[in-house]
Amino acid sequence: MAGILFALPSILGLMLFVMLPMLASLLLSFTDYRIVNTPKFIGLANYIRLFDGTDPYFYNSLWVTLKYVILRVPLGLVFSFMAAFLLNMQFIRGKSVFRTIFYLPSIVPAVASSMIWLWLFSPDLGLFNSFLEALNLPTLNWLYSEQTVVPSIVLMSLWGMGSTIIIFLAGLQGVPRSLYEAATVDGAGALRKFQHITIPMMTPIIFFNLIMGSIGAFQVFTEALIMTQGGPNNASLFYNYYIYRQAFQFGEMGQASAIAWILFIIILLVTVIFFRTSKSWVFYESEV
Amino acid sequence: MNKAKRVAGVVLSSVLTISLLLTGCSDSGGGPEAQGGKNGQKEPVTLKFSFWGDTIEKKTVTEALERFEQETGIQVEPMHVPADYLTKMTTMVAGNVAPDLGYLSSGAALSWGRDGKLLNLTPFMENDPDFKKEDYLDQIWYEIEPGNIIAMSTAVEGYGLMYNKDLLLEAGVELPPTDANKAWDWDTFVEYAKKLTLDDQGRNALDPNFNPDKIRQFGLQYDPYNMMAAVVSNGGNFLTEDGTGFGLARPEAIEAIQKLADLMYVHHVSPTPLQTKNMPDTALQTKKVAMTVSGNWALQAFAEQDFNLGVGVLPKLKESNTLLDGAPTVIFKSTKHPEEAWLLYKYMTDPESVLPLIEGGLWMPLKKEWYTNPELINKWAAGNKAHPEGYTEAFMKQTIENGFRTPGFEVKNLDKINALVTPALDLVWTGKQKAEEALKGVEPKVLPLIEGYYGR
């Protein structure tokens, strides 16, 4: 009884600020609601116009977002795992300095880092193109070409992987030393230890970061809002930016709610699939 | 039994807590008014005025609101929203806490006006003996349908040519005419622009050895955002005259848009959108660009820079004309004090109230007299740095006499149409497609969204 009372603040918070708005948006997704009118029930019309292609942006934004997720999630995992692995090495000096440096981008507000990267990506004066030029390589248009805009934003997002790196680092430090020592006694080399101890022991952490990374990647938004506004030619019209535009620029709240619910279901499905497959590859020490 | 009681207890206490929270919120919301009522005094009226703009605009508008407060005793709470303006307004309107009056983007104003969220100004104008609609310019009204006017433009913005005089004199180019009858035709304009475009060796674009990959100084910057100026000069418009067709896909508009794209990719006298990203705001001053096509507001920034600014009328395709742009100020229907809101509205439309912004080059005034009475003209359009010699002819006269209203004033559903047209035009401005291909290509998707003009 008292327990429930103590938990009441968070229960209430969840009810009032998560469940209730979600319920409201679900109901709104079946209505014609443009903020300035009273919502009118229109059944599934908001959903139908998305799937039958009446809305010219829906499939485009799904595809763009999917491209981003497919690039960003594996690259992000590999990059942050490798960074964490290096930051955990015995022989690297000044580790705490490097750890700070790798984490630093995570505390820079997204708006500020977007501005910095706008400069780096700048086709004429940007650092990246000057670098390519110095190596006599062809320069790229980065954010300003349909082909390179999504990879560019992925590249930028890798820079801000600090918190994933920290989680991996904590995981690496949690791997029992006794296992490595035993393997050394058995004559295992560094590669073997990595393959047969580090990776299996890290699978729960990898799994966690995979789920969180995927959810985060599906919701990519700020970069499109600040740097590209969905352009060029809708090549970076990410799903969340599309929701934002529909809701706050066109004022189509009913439609935006429907679009948002489809994303919710997609993320739910992806997460369920990951959980289903996890049994075959995630190893929990405590379960042995 | 016991368990049921416990559950009931939890439910009861939660309900109590929630209701306490909720009443707590609503109490604090209604505080000041309730107090005023208790003391038996007349309720002090407070109006909330929302607006966007840079620091200069913020200062001038806030000062104007303060003067209004002193003159009338009506309290005004300025709400300056520097970014994401429409998002904020949308949220406030959805949450029933909209300001009493303020700026609004034209697309939102017209569609909210159609849905009855904004006050119709007509009865106020008719019942106010101090107000004469004829005193104001005819082009500045946002009219949903005859008799339902939801806004005046906050200011007038005409378009014209602005240039660094020293660069033109150096290159031996004739200065752009300020008289509409003498406006450059397109070929003359392109030729002069070529003379003013220099590569890193100092060769201009007419030189056979000119290197278009190493341009040091561009003859002209023509922001594609301003393309409607070329379209109307060629006799086109955004929609067809009857409001049923997609005007930008008509030959006259296609021709104009292609000519603009050719400035970048055929004549190499104008920076591409990519190159524009790297142009500083001081491109004229720093001699990166010799001439630019922009709206009146740009004069404010140019006046603060140190160079020899000149102005002229736009080059013509078929006729010499220009664009008349603006953005509405509206009164929200949810206001509790419509009479006081109208007083403030009227006050802010008076050029005298916001003179620093007009004199400083950001705005052009709303009242006709300020364009005809020499004494009033001298208050803003002459004798200061933002309004160089020739301004009264090239901008003031041209805008009033030959200014076409931008589509934002009257095209229904414009935001959604533009969401399709802008990406299509991206392909033209980046040189990937011809104007005809891009605009004809997007036309079938645009047609179902076309709903005609407001106010007709």
Image (cartoon, coloured by chain):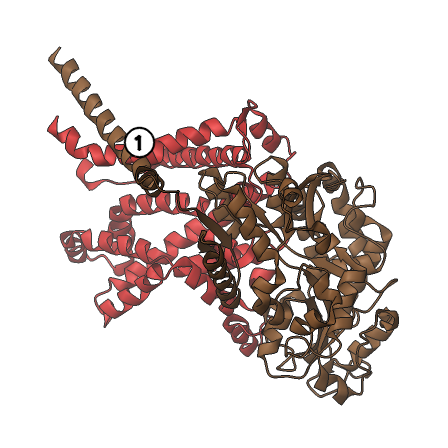
Q: Is residue B56 left or right of residue A7?
A: right
Q: Can residue A261 be seen from the camera position used here?
A: yes
Q: Give how far across and how far down residue A207 sits, in percent.
A: 32, 43
Which residue is labeled 1 in the image?
A: A15
State how many labels appear.
1
Q: Give how far across and how far down residue A274 sits, in percent.
A: 38, 37
Identify residue type, mark 1.
Answer: Met
- Indicate whether B194 appears above or below A202: below
Q: Give how far across and how far down residue A230 sits, in percent.
A: 57, 52
Camera-side residue: B420 or B376?
Answer: B376
Q: Give how far across and how far down residue A156 sits, in percent.
A: 45, 60
Query: Helix or strand or loop: what does disc 1 sit on?
Result: helix
Q: The chain drawn red is chain what?
A: A
Look at 29% across and 63% down and name the residue there: A86
Q: Residues within 10 Å of mark 1 (few under 14, many from 20)?
A: few
Quarter of image, res B224: bottom right
Tint of chain B:
brown
Q: Quadrant of the C terminus of chain B?
A: top right
Camera-side residue: B224 or B76?
Answer: B76
